[in-house]
Amino acid sequence: MDIAPITYDGSSTLATQIIEGAAVDVFASADEKNMQKVVDAGLASDPELFASNTLVIAVPAGNPAGIASLADLADPANTVVLCAAEVPCGAASQTLLQNAGLTVTPASLEQNVTAVLTKVAAGEADAGLVYATDVIGNDDVEAIVPDGAKDVVNHYPVVALDAATNGPVAAAFVAFVLGGEGQAILSDLGFGAP
């Protein structure tokens, strides 16, 4: 049996690719908004939540800028990178910062959380907001859990696409992710329960 390649990118990019006709069997989104776009396009139905995640402040190892809180991200002396508003980490970042009453002017807005983490790990930024799961096992960065993070939770849905080339395999994969073994793996990787 041929195994289809896995494509990783921001959920908004993946949703757009699916809507534009990319051959996809399963879509897992880092938020419900982008999944809904695929459902609204008539390409899938009945997605199910499989995990959740919250934001942390990522800083380079050793935290050279001495970042301690969200308020430090608003200091123009600090170089901060964030995800763009249209991607899940960007929407969550905006909510977290708004809840804290802060305005941050980022040095750049990235199209996915990996790009934010890469810039922070390389020392190109003093800090960035990423998911808690993104910093696990990465020795190039440290994580600071900001106040209010537990109030901004992304819920991750998954679905087998209606036009999956191998519907039974796609459905079996979704069932695995939702089942006990899949949930245990996700928990070990730092994801929260759906």
Image (cartoon, rainbow, N blue to C red):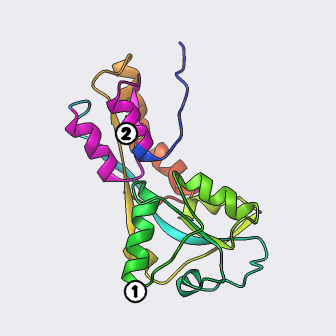
Amino acid type for the residue under numbered disc 1: Gly
Q: Residues within 10 Å of mark 2 (few under 14, many from 20)?
A: many
Q: Residues within 10 Å of mark 1 (few under 14, many from 20)?
A: few
**In what element is the residue under mark 1?**
loop
The location of residue 112, given as percent across then percent down, is 53, 52
The location of residue 67, given as percent across then percent down, is 66, 83
- Is 27 one of the magenta-colored residues? yes
**Is 149 positioned to the left or the right of 45 in the image?**
right
**Is 13 positioned to the left or the right of 131 in the image?**
left
Residue 35 lies in quadrant: top left
Amino acid type for the residue under numbered disc 2: Ala
Which residue position is annotated with label 1? 101
Work out whether 118 lies above or below 54.
Answer: above
On the question of residue 60 being in view, the answer is: yes
Work out whether 13 lies above or below 79.
Answer: above
Work out whether 94 lies above or below 167.
Answer: below
The numbered mark, 2 or 1, whose residue comes first in the sequence reads 2
Which residue position is annotated with label 2? 15
Q: Are marks 2 and 1 in contact (CB under 8 Å)?
A: no
Magenta residue span = 13-41
Q: Residue at x 26, y 30 (%)?
A: 43
